[in-house]
Image (cartoon, rainbow, N blue to C red):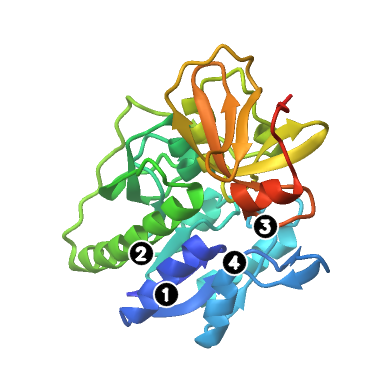
Amino acid sequence: MKIIFAGTPEFAAVALHALLDAGMQVPLVLTQPDRPAGRGMQLHASAVKQLALQHGIPVAQPVSLRLDGKHPEVAREAHALVEATPHDIMVVAAYGLILPQSFLSLPPRGCINIHGSLLPRWRGAAPIHRAIEAGDSETGVTIMQMNEGLDTGPMLMMQSLPIADDDTTGSLHDKVAALGARMLVDALRQLEAGTLPAQPQPEQGVTYAAKISKEEAALDFRLPAAVLDRRIRAFNPFPGAIGNFAGTPVKLWNASVVNAPTAASPGDILAANAVQGVLVACGDGVLRVTELQKPGGKRLPAAEFLKAFPMEGGRFA
């Protein structure tokens, strides 16, 4: 089959790489427009665009696909390009644009999507973050047919993946991306052979993974240490969990739970040294923080961080 691929970040690039390694034909790639990034805020191509150009694949970057949206002329051009490109199916992975029904109907064999959860749990934008934050013991990948709903299409293939106690969104992302890429190649081969039936999603167990916002980064130490540990891991690498120490927003990148009772008030720092790290009293239990970052500084192990930023006897507000 000839495959039009739509995706943007590294998660999608892993899938595109797998298609190309498997010898599949990709005559066109759709990805988001270049975005400013870095200290100089220069325009940077997406991971998918970079990979496509390395392989000489034509790339289109429409800002919208909605014929009734703010950029109907751009959407019409994208529709026409897809119609003019010989293909059988479209694969969508973390593309970032809404695909209206008019666009979903273009590929002869429809559009399939790689979603980083065990649907119908964690439909939406941030399934990996929310699975860690919620304390799920497992996540996985669902390959599904797309419809106009938010991750509501029929399921073609599903495989689970355990969530380790020390998994961050960064580490789990890489595991989910690798699994999704392998499953995608398998699913496309089975679809071409006609041996992959679609199944509707269960009506029970639906949850939604809302997009992560920077406003969620601030930690409330009145919460249990186990909850804060999950949030720190869920917000690593973005947006980074924050504790306010003496008016300074300190990012907390890695931590673990210490099951020790304490009479201290939530936020009180019980110890801050090279051996113990930074021990913080919580609403229930104690949090041991082992990697921190001050504004404008680097992420540092607690021992290094405390040399220039002593915290003994202080507290997080």
- First of labels 3, 2 by sequence position: 3
**Residue at 47% over, 42% down:** 127
Crowd tier of the residue under label 4, counting other residues whose Cα lies within 10 Å: few below 14, some 14–19, many 20 or above: many
The quadrant in which the C terminus is found is top right
Q: Secondary structure beneath disc 1?
A: helix
**Residue at 38% over, 79% down:** 20
Q: Secondary structure beneath disc 4?
A: loop
**Residue at 76% over, 38% down:** 249
Viewer-side label of 1, 4: 1
Please name the residue that numbered disc 4 is placed on: 31
Please name the residue that numbered disc 3 is placed on: 64
Q: Position of residue 179 (x, y in %)?
A: 32, 59
Q: Position of residue 19 (x, y in %)?
A: 37, 74
Please name the residue that numbered disc 1 is placed on: 17
Contact (CB < 8 A) between labels 1 and 2? yes
Q: The residue under label 4 is which amino acid type?
A: Thr
- First of labels 1, 2 by sequence position: 1
Viewer-side label of 3, 1: 1
Disc 4/disc 2 C-alpha distance (Å): 17 Å
The quadrant in which the N terminus is found is bottom left
Residue 181 bears which disc, if any? 2
Can you say whether 182 is above or below 121 in the image?
below
Disc 1/disc 4 C-alpha distance (Å): 15 Å
- First of labels 3, 4 by sequence position: 4
Viewer-side label of 3, 2: 2
Q: In the image shown, does 238 or 81 lie closer to the viewer?
A: 238
Q: The residue under label 2 is which amino acid type?
A: Ala
Q: Position of residue 125 (x, y in %)?
A: 54, 43
Disc 3/disc 1 C-alpha distance (Å): 25 Å
Q: What number of labels is visible?
A: 4
